[in-house]
Amino acid sequence: MMENKTLQGGSTANKNGRVLEDLVRSVLKTHNYTEMPYINWVACGSPRNTLVLRVPYTTIYNTKGYTEFLIATNTIKIRLECKWQQATGSVDEKYPYLFENMLHVDENFIIILLSGGGYKKQAKEWLSNSCNTCEKKTIKLFNTEEFTIWANKNLPKL
């Protein structure tokens, strides 16, 4: 007999966020990227063609933050931040904080993967406009389909 357990809000969000992260892992695995935690990646000499997990950075508040992924290709390092919002909530109110933090990471190419459809239309428009008009770094805002298309087209060349 299966037990029906109701997940609390944070647990549900974490579970749904893992679905998005698993999609990233699957796409990169298809392109022969090895998955490795950040600490091991650094200890191994930062090998290329690696999907690096839980990558630290210093936030705008001068505290430690973590990005889900870093894509280390043969030619470039791409920071990848995942944001899943399936239902209305507060994640979209954090977009300015996320965007400002990404301006301060070491990498000059950042992907923000936004999915779930529960964000406010205006919040997504603000984030999209901020990414498109950013002159300091290349910041791409993708949904899952756009990310997959980008990866299939670009990862073999990078």
Image: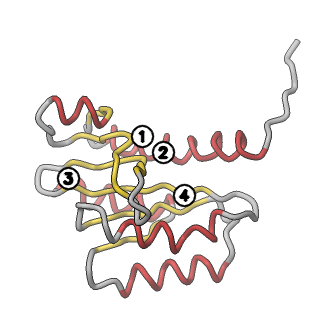
Q: Which residue is identified by label 4?
A: 83
Q: Is residue 28 left or right of residue 122?
A: left
Q: Is residue 96 left or right of residue 45?
A: right
Give 134 or 156, whichever is nearer the viewer: 134
Please identify the quarter of the rendering in which residue 109 is found: bottom left
Percent of width and height locating residue 61 = 44, 63
Q: Residue at x 67, y 69 (%)?
A: 119
State yes or no: discs 1 and 2 in contact (Cβ < 8 Å).
Answer: yes
Give the distance between the C-alpha atoms of the residues marked 1 and 4, in whole angstroms: 17 Å
Q: Amino acid at mark 2?
A: Leu
What numbered label is drawn on residue 23?
2
Mark 4 surroundings within 10 Å by alpha-carbon count, few (fewer than 14), some (14 through 19), many (20 or more): many
Q: Residue at x 22, y 34 (%)?
A: 41
Question: Is any atom of residue 133 visible in this view?
Answer: yes
Q: Which residue is identified by label 3?
A: 156
Q: Amino acid at mark 3?
A: Pro
User: Which colour assignment does the render follow?
Assistant: secondary structure
Mark 3 surroundings within 10 Å by alpha-carbon count, few (fewer than 14), some (14 through 19), many (20 or more): few
Instruction: Please determine whether, in this image, residue 121 is positioned above or below residue 148.
Output: below
Number of numbered discs on residues: 4
Pick whichever of labels 3 and 4 is earlier in the sequence. 4
Name the image quarter holding the N terminus: top right
Query: Secondary structure beneath disc 4?
Result: strand
Instruction: Please determine whether, in this image, residue 4 is positioned above or below residue 7.
Output: above
Q: Residue at x 12, y 50 (%)?
A: 74
Give 155 or 125, whichever is nearer the viewer: 125
Q: Which residue is identified by label 1?
A: 26
Give the distance between the C-alpha atoms of the residues marked 1 and 2, in whole angstroms: 5 Å
Q: Amino acid at mark 4?
A: Lys
